[in-house]
Amino acid sequence: MYARCLTERLRRLLGVMPAVYLQGARQTGKTTLAKQLLEAGVLRDYVSFDDPLVRTAAQRDPVGFVRNLPTGTALDEAQLVPEVMPVLKMRIDESRAAGMFLLTGSASPLANAQVADAMVGRMVALQLLPLAQAEIAGSAVNWVAQAFTEPPTSARYPDAADLTARLTRGGYPVAVALDDPAARAEWLRSYADALITRDLQTLGGVERQDAVLTLLRLLAANPCATANIAGLSRETGVAQATLSRYLSLLTNLFVAHPVPAWYANLGKRLLKAPKLMLNDTGLAVALAGFDETRLEREPTYAGKLLENFVGMELLKHIHCSDAQTRLYHLRTDKGIEVDFVLESAQGELVGVEVKRRSTLHAGDFRGLRWLQSAVPERFRLGVVFYTGERSLPMGEGLWAVPITALWSEPL
């Protein structure tokens, strides 16, 4: 069982807020985390709406159901019974005590009006993503937090010999535990089918499940690509408006993660389309029909998959920190790109590039230098993650950093 970096944030918030909504894709570990808090005495009871009998009881008499819940109850898969939300709202308003409820959900609360209304001023939401590589390694590394507080130093890190294996394994706890690659790929494909046939229905309004599954596979085949709604519409055979709605549904299930374009008052030089990441590279590999051998043979796909991998690791580090850091990407109308831009609550910027190479060239820092010169007063650090072993200074404010620094301490 893996220690989750979100645990302490969750415990702390339950100590001061009436309710916390723990959201995230199915099978990321929300239930396990809730039960750990129950065993630790942070919570007093656990109820799952995945249980048909419990779900029926709550739907038939939401008032009586909620009134009989002890303070300190976890309600698992709360989005399945939106009828209880107005009653939870009233009960919270009567007491406003800390730690009354922990709700978990595999769909965004904002996708349901009843849930969203009940949350306002009463709950805070945390997102549990698939396992970070640091969590798998049992490491406390949070690279994003360090990037804004600690200047890099020259150091040697563990090699990246197992990087392809990490990409194909991903971070879903069940998949991480499966050592058989074929069994893991089968589980991940079955997981995607279940998302479409079961979980998607809780959000409603899906005319063509086959088109949503095709869209998910297209995202897997083109990881971290800039959103092209017209192109995706042609390939799925659905209208652009419908395609945009299907993409929003996948986002509300936390499987797709749009990365917005970073924007500043620099004229019209910056493009505004988001990038589209899948939440897990293991899922992407399984849906795209790749394995470790094929990844090694197709470096273009492997490079984009690695970019998706790093983007999700950065997002996981962000969610595990109290700092209000935001993740963006940058592309100019002249084709200059920065894979990811981290922006702190104070407006400081850290630029991140990703290269699937063990050696780097001056041109690899082109986008970072552009960002540094465009907003020098806000630029804190520019980093190129690569597959080498040493972190090295590459100019004022610019560093080459081993990708293993995302989950490893220096040697």
Image (cartoon, grey):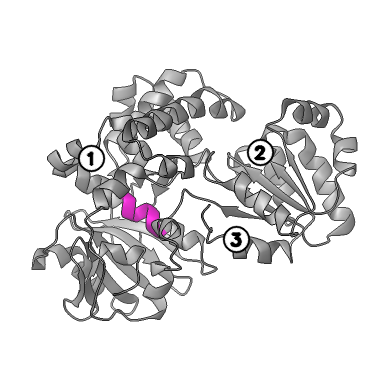
The answer to whether residue 264 is seen in the rendering is no
Compared to residue 211, the image places residue 312 above or below, namely below
Query: Upstream in the sequence, badge 3 or badge 1?
Result: 3
Considering the numbered disc 2 on the image, is that residue within a helix, a strand or a loop? loop
Disc nearest the viewer among 1 and 2: 1
Would residue 8 appear left or right of 388 to someone viewing this image? Answer: right
Residue 91: within the magenta?
no
Residue 278 image-quadrant placement? top left
The answer to whether residue 272 is seen in the rendering is yes
Considering the numbered disc 1 on the image, is that residue within a helix, a strand or a loop? helix
The residue labelled by disc 3 is 7
Compared to residue 267, the image places residue 348 above or below, namely below
Residue 149 image-quadrant placement? bottom left
Would residue 409 appear left or right of 290 to someone viewing this image? Answer: right
- Report the residue at 46% width, 30% height from top: 191
- The three-letter code of the residue at mark 2 reads Glu
Considering the numbered disc 3 on the image, is that residue within a helix, a strand or a loop? helix
Compared to residue 305, the image places residue 362 above or below, namely below
- The boundaries of the magenta stretch are 308-314
- The three-letter code of the residue at mark 3 reads Thr
- Report the residue at 35% width, 60% height from top: 263
Q: CA distance from mark 3 to mark 1?
A: 33 Å
Of 344 and 95, nearer the camera is 95
- The three-letter code of the residue at mark 1 reads Glu
Query: Upstream in the sequence, badge 1 or badge 2?
Result: 2
Would residue 277 appear left or right of 96 to someone viewing this image? Answer: left
The residue labelled by disc 1 is 292
- Report the residue at 58% width, 25% height from top: 201
* Numbered tag placed on residue 77 in the rendering: 2
